[in-house]
Amino acid sequence: MLHLVRGSLVLFQGGNNQSNLAAVCIAHKNMMMLVVIMSLAVFACKGLVQAVPFPAPNFNDCNNYQGCCPAPYNGTISEKLYVFDRKLPMRTRPAAHLLDDAYIAKYQRAYRLLKALPDSDPRSWKNQATLHCAYCNAAFNFDVLTSSGRSSTISFEVHFGWLFLPWHRFFLYFHERILAKLLGDDDTFALPFWNWDNQSPEPPLANVIPLAFANPMYDNKVQSSLYDERRNRCTKWPNLIDLQWQLECANQTLELQTSLRQWNNRLMYTQLVTAAPISRLFFGESYTLGGAPGRGAGTLEVTPHGTVHLWTGNPNATIPLSDMGILRYAALDPIFYAHHGNIDRLWEVWKSLPGGNRKDLSQADYLNTQFLFYDENAALVKVQISQALNINNFRSGTHYSHEF
Ligand code: C2O
């Protein structure tokens, strides 16, 4: 399908040829999973042609790489961008370690209902994880016709660069809206966030697996819908999180825990303050259709985002590091969404830091990049990054504050 014309450059979407350099770079990165995020690797892949923003991928033209295709769509996709519901009440995302019993009961019910949806429903639990996987595992290809007339294919990837924060903000929003719908149109429902950057030693602790997720049973009666058996044994209570996770499970003496708190605090300070004084360093490198892929993740994406994933996944699982430590499976652990709630919150925290330079990116190629999602009514909707930058669009997040 002819997709875009700019100057002498013609771009189209839909091929399957994986043999070019860009696709190889992306496939290679996925093989290395999230470990790559930790190493701040910048791949030396060459740009192909002049860059333009990525248009929304075609869900019905998905290459089933690693079994990751979102539910196909019948009918036409509106050219119009998604319209946020201005009538939604403002919602405050609560910290997961502070939830009261009534909230946990609702939270449990929401995931029980989501997990009960049949896979024929594009909103289903499995389809949530598949959608995440599709956007990160070479499922969508864009063919690029270079100026020399040769055709190349590049794969779409929302990690390792500037698409990371806005894509996950949208993903979380639609996930949250689906849960609210399943709760019987409970528009007050807001996803809790896992406040792992909070190192306070006062109980209830924030820098552990929140209790709502920790117990395989809920209320000693039924299986918890927030539990995932594929988690690292290091995540067991009362182990504190290690934001610089090195793939070892140290015995956490009180002394080590005191040090861990300090290291975690320092790490947060580095990644949000000293190492990210300007937008490019915080958001990551540019990534456009025709530009070089995977040029580098922003500070927040590398550590702590990647390290929390790795700390949580089980290195001894049949598929090592699943669920949370592998992009393909990560969204199959309900804690994924609370983890990203915190990432989303830290984006706002970073913007609120003094100094005047911590601003959202403003390049047109960034703002005009588009994605597709299924909304709470299972309709396919189109969004673009320019819509992601104002948290008020999402009617949530008023509670976003942080102290270092
Ligand atoms: Cu799409 Cu935390 O990864």
Image (cartoon, rainbow, N blue to C red):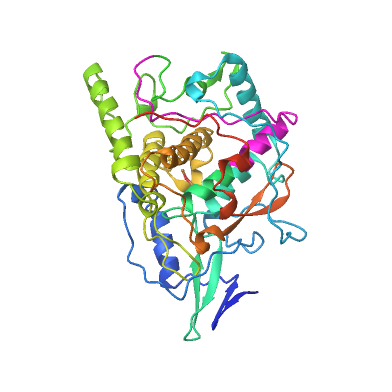
Looking at the picture, how far across and down is residue 38, in whole percent?
32, 46
In this rendering, position of residue 285 left or right of residue 97:
left
Residue 117 point in image, percent of width and height: 70, 37
**Residue depicted at x 48% and y 36%:** 345
Residue 38 magenta-highlighted: no
Q: Which residues are magenta?
A: 173-202
Q: Main secondary structure of the magenta part?
A: loop
Give the percent coordinates (x, y) of residue 337. Answer: 53, 36
Q: Is 185 located above or below residue 201 in the figure?
A: below
Q: Is residue 294 above or below residue 252?
A: below
Q: Nearer the viewer, residue 398 or 313?
A: 398
In depth, the one of 161 and 17 nearer the eye is 161
The quarter of the image holding the C terminus is top left
The quadrant the N terminus occupies is: bottom right
Any part of residue 74 in sight: yes
Res 188 → quadrant: top right
At 46% from the left edge and 23% from the top edge, which residue is drawn?
A: 210
Instruction: From this view, report whether residue 59 is shown above or below residue 264.
Output: below
